[in-house]
Image (cartoon, rainbow, N blue to C red):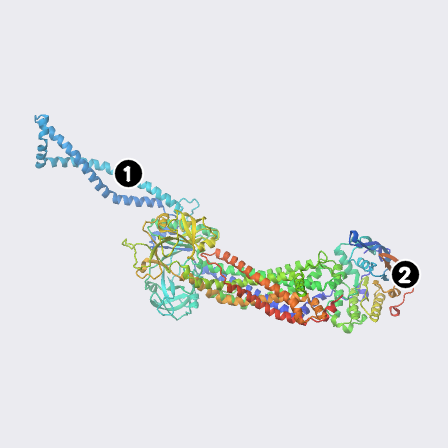
Amino acid sequence: MRWNGEEYGGMKGKIKNPLTKRLPRELVGDWRKYLVVCLFLVLTIGFVSGMYVANESMLSAANSGVEKYKLEDGHFELAEKADPELLEAIATGEKADVKSYYLKTAKAELDDAFEGEFNAEFTEEFDAEFSKHFEESFEEQVKESLLSQGLDEASAIGMLPSAIAQAKESGAYQDAFDAAYSDAFSSAYDEAYKKAYDEAWSKILAEIDEKYADAEEKYKLNDADFRPVPVSLYENFYRNEEEDHDHDGVTDGSVRVYLKTDDVNLACLMDGRFPEGDDEIAIDRMHADNVGLKVGDAITVGNKEWKVVGLLAYVNYATLHEKSTDVMFDALKFNVAMTTKEGFDSLQTPIHYGYAWQYQNSPEDETEEKQLADNFLAAVLTQTVTAENELTDFLPTYANPAVYFAVDDMGGDMAMGGVLLDILIVIIAFIFAVTISNTIMRESRTIGTLRASGYTRGELIRHYLSMPVIVTLFSEALGNLLGYTVFKDVVVSMYYNSYSLPVYETLWNPSAFVKTTLIPLILMFAVNFIVVARKLRYTPLAFLRQDLKKGGRKRAIRLPRWNFFRRFRMRIIFQNAPNYLILFFGVFFVTVLLAMAVGMPDTLDYYKENASDMMFADYQYILNSCEEEDGNVIETSNDSAERFAMTSLIRKSDAINEEVSVYGIEDGSSYVPIDGLSSLRENEVYISDSFRDKYDVSVGDTILLDEKYESKQYQFKVAGFYDRSLSIAVFMPIGQFRSVFGVAQDAFSGYLSDSEITDLEESSIATVITEREITKMCDQLDHSMGAYMRYFQVLCILLSAVMIYLLTKIIVEKNENAISMTKVLGYENSEIARLYLLSTTMVFLVCNTVSVFLGTLVMSAAWRAIMSSYSGWFAFMITPAGYATMFLFVLIGYLVVLFFDFRRVKRIPLNLALKNAD
Amino acid sequence: MGQGKHFLQIVDITKSFGSGDTKQEVLRGISFSVEKGEFCVLLGPSGSGKSTLLNIIGGIDSADSGSISIHGDNLKELGEKRLTQYRRRHLGYVFQQYNLIPNLNVRENIEVGAYLSDAPLDTDELLHTLELYEHRHKLPNQLSGGQQQRVSIGRAIVKNPDILLCDEPTGALDYTTSKEILKLIEEINRKYQNTVIMVTHNEAIQNMADHVIRLRDGRVRLDERNTRRISADALEW
């Protein structure tokens, strides 16, 4: 066959595909659309890239800080300072021999008390018995003596009383008594003592067996999986002091003051220097930023003025969680600080005897870490019990939110940012796909000609995929460039505003590359490939005939006898249904984001405004003990005070071990007025609304709660709910509480009061729970995220405008011919707008209304899922004004776009329809 | 492709559309042959099946029965990929609608065809032949209908196809422009020795053809060689 190009002066070499020359012209020709798409992608990719780079770099700094700053593997706290023997015993990680301890203690107690008690009891009993026997025996002896003197029986009996009286008078009776008593006592005592001692010991042994059986269960003494966990122990003592940083004499918050140490839990110096003098203090950098303190400022801590010489980031306080059960850290009202030993000693509040541990053999993974912590807990518990000390706190690092919260949160942010990017890319990809699909429809005959001329389907697919891929690649390159420079700093400043993290170095991040470059490209390619390949599956002839509808031509849907305009609009809606569907998804996506941007401040406002209603008492004073050292019950003269009992149990689940406050409430309580509380049966309880909401508990359900440090489980049946408690709490009568937890019948934990109790010794108060417990979380969230939420709202308006712009542009472009034809027919622009733009507006309003509710539902579910992995609970709230705001924000975006759409409709030329007519 | 007796051999082609009562037989046993370099015209009224036949020859439609062979190779035996390659290597298409790419200029639209060939014609030379050299930087919407059709012919011919298939190439053009296009096709046929198969309902065009096939009701009513071929310039209608 003749096919020799040379014969006809053929060109040398293969020419480049001329179709590629379309791409820059298309970019220039439709620059507004591509600019919007590019900006959209660049900003999103840039922000996510920045987030990944910042997170990974900061996480890397935090991870390397674990070793550099000697992060503990956990810490525990004792009621008394541990002696060296106890510390040595704990450091072995071995469990103490509790049974030997019980036996030794019992033996000592028995030996100590038995003899005295036995002597008194034996002597009294013996004396009574002996006297009785001796009387009878002495009478017999006297009688025998009288008979032996020749008296007959009757005479001897008759003389007996006088003979006995005479013997008593002469002392013979007493001599005989003494002689007999001494012999009898001695032999009886020895015999009775041994018997009584043995009996007492047997009884004690039985009691110890029972007690040990309890201990076995509580401390898992017979745990076959137990392995000793040798650790290194470090003193990590601290004091909780009051802080006044604005010098107005009013306490602004609390500060946990640590001694400067080089052993464990070191601090990264962010500014200034470490304290050297006894009035110098270094404080947490984030707290300082939040309250406006800087190096050189003065601060009052524990009624003493200090000079702030340094700003720190403690490795074990990446977030300022005051307690491990706090839902949220509190960088506004809680601070950690470092002083010299002299400075520390000058403070007055009681020292907390905290001890940090590090495993000698580091665990391989989290599972092993949990196992080690469980075993170590058993060792610490048994050793403290046998050393007659008390374990008041035990917190492995993996369960310490001050350590893991920032890392988890940054990980969560990355995951969420990644998902948002994926969703946005998919939406943009669909917008591209619909645009290309319309282009293919419009260029159908050209495509048919090209296919008929020999262009393969693959070549055309590649051609139509080029634009989204090029735009994506360009946006990714620019986005990543901005991510590594501008946005990284934005994210870093966001995190430094919330977390107390050490200094970091920017690291090249492969996962950022995958997330912000590979995955978006794959998503963009995949979505468009599926749509384009499907669209180009038709034969060349089908393209030439413009016969690209599957299943032939559609029949018109029958419509009611409405007026013309109404019917026309309905036709437009039906005709553009696929585009409107994408419009719905776009609007829906924006409303989900808006639900967060609007709902978060709404939720915080709600909790801040209603905090007092959610407290059953303005003050909850929890005492160290209900008795003073001298055994007297701690009383108050405050008339509003009411006793209550409280303990903490754990609700175990795969997601989280949630701390549950269990309250024992007095009958007829004025603070927890639950009808029928006093008539609850043995294991029935009320639970807080938060508990019900978080764990979806119903009346009649059984809840299982475990002791915090011991292997003991409680089972309660839910009898009802109590709505004035934000915490995860259980309520029962105080009598039932005492019986369930085996405490004394008059024991209590503290006082509830609506006014401040001033007559309690400070040293006797363990903690005071006030409204701040609720508001501090809201304040912190508001401080950390409030401003961002407002930016986010503006971003959502822009996002909605961009998305609606791109989608309505497609709809107008798709209908250009028809619009042009209506112009030819004599319709005015306003009439055309009533037909085409009003149709879109109607659909948009429906989409917006439905999306506002659906978006809120989705956000609410997402919120629930997020909160489930944290301690505590607060539900997602959105006010009616919030719904209106969401609707309005998207509407603003639409109205802006509507203006441009109307201009676009006006600019469609009359001759377009005629030009394109067959 | 193998060597056959005729360059293009069409044997007993049938084609129908629809089924049952609506079945419409468009081609009812069409047979004829075309020689290499021949200018062949398919004539017939609307609905006679001439465009369908052209599409089947072009491999963008398939026959229900019968065979089409080019140099002895049967098109029916080619799968979709090889059919595309067949079109790519051996065919050029010109339609009544120009189907140009609106955002490519004249030269680039022609290069769209050149890209498909390993040895395309020289584009500049072709532009001169097409009398489009001066317009080479213009976009299609800046050209007249005749100029646009010239571009579409250039796009088809630049890859130097064995067969140039033209489906009513002058159908949308006025008399003068139509004649210019016909002259161009004639010149190309002469210059490059491509086999040209043109579908038209214009009876006058048969006078410039080497070979005339007249179809009616799906059958070949006339199959004759034109011994008194005249130039396109001399055509009148």
Where on the picture, by quarter, is residue A552? bottom right
**Which secondary structure lies at badge 2?**
strand
Image x and y of residue A79, in percent: 34, 55
Residue bearing mark 2: B225
Q: Residues within 10 Å of mark 2 (few under 14, many from 20)?
A: some
Residue projecting furthest to the bottom: B134
Q: Secondary structure at mark 1?
A: helix
Q: Where is residue A40 shown, x and y percent of the image?
A: 59, 66
Instruction: Estimate the x, y position of residue A672 in percent, counting from the top left.
Output: 38, 55
Q: On the picture, is A228 further left or further right than B190?
A: left
Q: Is label 2 on the same chain as label 1?
A: no
**Residue nearest the observer in this picture, A854 or A511:** A854
Q: Is residue A369 above or below residue A34?
A: above
- Amino acid identity at mark 2: Arg
Q: Is residue A205 left or right of residue A861?
A: left
Chain letter of disc 1? A
Residue at 9%, 25% in the rendered image: A152
Query: Badge 1 is on which residue?
Result: A199
Residue at the right extreme? B228
